[in-house]
Amino acid sequence: MDHTNVSTTTYFIITGISDEPLLRCFVFFLVLVIYLLTLGGNISIFLLVCLDHHLHTPMYFFLANLSILDISCSTITLHKILISFISGDNTVSVVGCLVQIFAFLSLTCDELLVLAAMSYDRYVAICNPLHYHRVMDSKLCVLLASLCWVCGFIESIPTLMELFKLTCYESNKMDHFFCDIIPVLKLSCSDSSFLQLYILIVGTFIGGSTPFALTFISYIFIIIAILSIRSSSGRHKAFYTCSSHLTVVICFYASLVFQYLRPMSSINLGSNKYFSLFNTAVVPILNPLIYSLKNKDVKATIRRRMRTGLSTKTQGYNGNTEINKTRS
């Protein structure tokens, strides 16, 4: 290992996915394509929600927040693969690394909370449909979204403070493609027992389990309400309204469980970074795909926007033709 004196450890070397040149090229182009698709898909969802009044509902308001989180999380984590391949610089300062960890943890907590808020929205829509618009009014939606963003960042502040207390590192070579908390703790030879305890209690049991419990309880009531519907078409329609959100929840929680919910001693960094790549690259691109392919409202909005664009071009072409005829 590349042992470094504690007083001179001012930067980390990010090894990336692989040292093989061909594999590095493949990973670069794969990540570039996935990142561009993630940007395009989530920006499209965000713009559709903002511009089309048919999507000005609580569900799509939270979906727009989810799109912003996915864009931010992908940008924070994947940019190092792209920049290091182009520039050849795979170093990052210790301060920059710890700030990146803080941002990633905050956005992950925010996404868990936003998914929990979306599950509450689906609960009200299915279990209390007559009072849905009265309960899920714009004030409550803005309040829930604000709480999600603020709580996620507040929850990660103690982690950042404890990370800055780590002064001893066995090596400055990090076997990962971005600064994540597990590789840093693996490299650290400082006493991180309090930080690990905080991550276990606050991060896992509060930051992770609380949103999961809220989501799980909401879906228990949703399933009970769906099963009480007499007609099969009614049950299918009710389940269809929350199937997209449920699919996103399962994908996101499954990726986090495989990545983080294991004893620190049993985590292999070589394999763990592939779980990280799935979580930071694949999951964000799944959200717009799932909501655009499975959601009738989004598909109808896309078709309506495409027809509007085509009709505008046709009108413009016909108008120019008439003007040319007049001039002739």
Image (cartoon, rainbow, N blue to C red):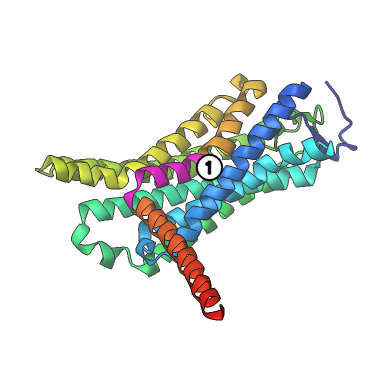
Q: Return the residue nearer the eye: 211 or 41.
A: 41
- Examine the structure image and report whether residue 164 is included in the region drawn in magenta: no
Q: In the visual, does 145 lie left or right of 260?
A: left
Residue at x 51%, y 27% (from the top left corner): 258
Classify the position of the N terminus by image quarter.
top right
Identify the element where label 1 is drawn.
Answer: helix
Q: Residue 167 location in percent, x, y?
A: 80, 38
Q: Amino acid at mark 1?
A: Pro
State whether residue 57 is above or below residue 123.
below
Residue at x 79%, y 42% (from the top left corner): 94
Residues drawn in magenta: 284-296
Residue at x 70%, y 37% (from the top left corner): 178
Say if residue 194 shows up in the picture.
no
Residue at x 54%, y 25% (from the top left corner): 262
State whether residue 66 is above or below residue 91.
below
State whether residue 110 is above or below residue 52.
above
Pointer 1 residue: 284
Q: Return the residue nearer the eye: 103 or 81.
A: 81
Count all numbered tags in the image, as a single digit: 1
